[in-house]
Amino acid sequence: MTDIGTEPPIVVNVGSATDKGLRRALNEDSFLASGTLFLVADGMGGHDAGEVASATVIEVYTRLASQPSISLEEMQLAFTDAAERVRLLPEGRGAGAGTTLSGVAVAQVDEAAYWLMINLGDSRTYRLAEGQFEQISVDHSLVQERVERGELTSEQATRDAQRNVVTRAIGAGSDSQPDYWYIPASAGDRLLVCSDGLTGELTDDHIQQILRDEVAPQAAATRLVHESLLHGGRDNVTAVVVDAVSVAGHEVGSETLPHLPLPRESRRDDLNDTVPRSETHGATS
């Protein structure tokens, strides 16, 4: 990685919104939308435990957000620290809880600007760029594994009784690692980071239309959350919208470094609490 000094390689405008939803007593989502780091963590555990786990993770990453760019090594070290802190949460204050994590950091490789994506669980990161809308994270969920093995269609997965079971998480008895990708950044990119409280209520087409309709990122984030409430609000919901206003070294490093995942199908059905696979009985992977 190259040190770019004090100027970030991607200048952004950001909007964020969150709500506990219409059926939850508290909001277990936590998020970071500051500086050069944009993350959403969806806590699992209930009774304040999930809230503590997600907030603990976001607190660890916050220290990176003021940097002009963030390296893969720094993200990996922060993850190790966050996972250990969640593991050590005391009884009555988050012990045994877990959380998902998804989002992007501003990064630089060979003087070119990149989005450095991190993902663990079934919170999601999307990109709207050059007229194309795609999910750039890959769900770590039981139904997604079954879809990839050909046991379920994407449509069946949206109705499956185990659609809320994640196969990777921070905490909750999991020691799994996140996925990372470098994605070349371009001026005009619009990214959405969200918890599954949004994707459980709105189809990808609906999400895309809102992102296209609303010019300001704050207006887009606010409307996304509002629309999810209008469509049921069955879970906590968080949306962070990030617009790339300008990008340094745009012409350099035009290829994605690791493999870029394909878009995923939309999800329509009711959303239950997200739970780790370790809490299910007889679940297959």
Image (cartoon, rainbow, N blue to C red):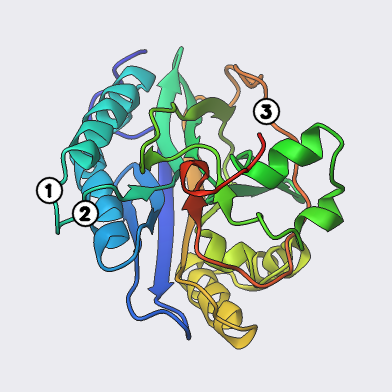
- What whole-number distance in Å separates the C-alpha atoms at marks 2 and 3? 34 Å
Residue 260 disc label:
3
Q: Is residue 118 above or below residue 110?
A: below
- Which amino acid type is shown beneath numbered disc 2? Gly
**Looking at this view, is 99 or 61 the one in front?**
99
Q: Residue 44 at x, y = what percent? A: 39, 56
Q: Residue at x 85, y 57 (%)?
A: 155
Q: Is 138 on the left or on the right of 32, as rendered?
A: right
Q: Residue at x 48, y 43 (%)?
A: 246
- What whole-number distance in Å separates the C-alpha atoms at marks 3 and 1? 38 Å
- Which amino acid type is shown beneath numbered disc 1? Pro
Q: Is 122 on the left or on the right of 104, as rendered?
A: right
Q: Do we see residue 67 in this rendering? A: no
Task: Give residue 30's quadrant in the image.
Answer: bottom left
Q: Residue 43 at x, y = what percent? A: 37, 56
Q: Residue 118 at x, y = what percent? A: 46, 34
Residue 94 disc label:
2
Disc 3 packing (10 Å; few <14; some 14–19; many ≥20): some
Task: Give residue 42's quadrant in the image.
Answer: bottom left
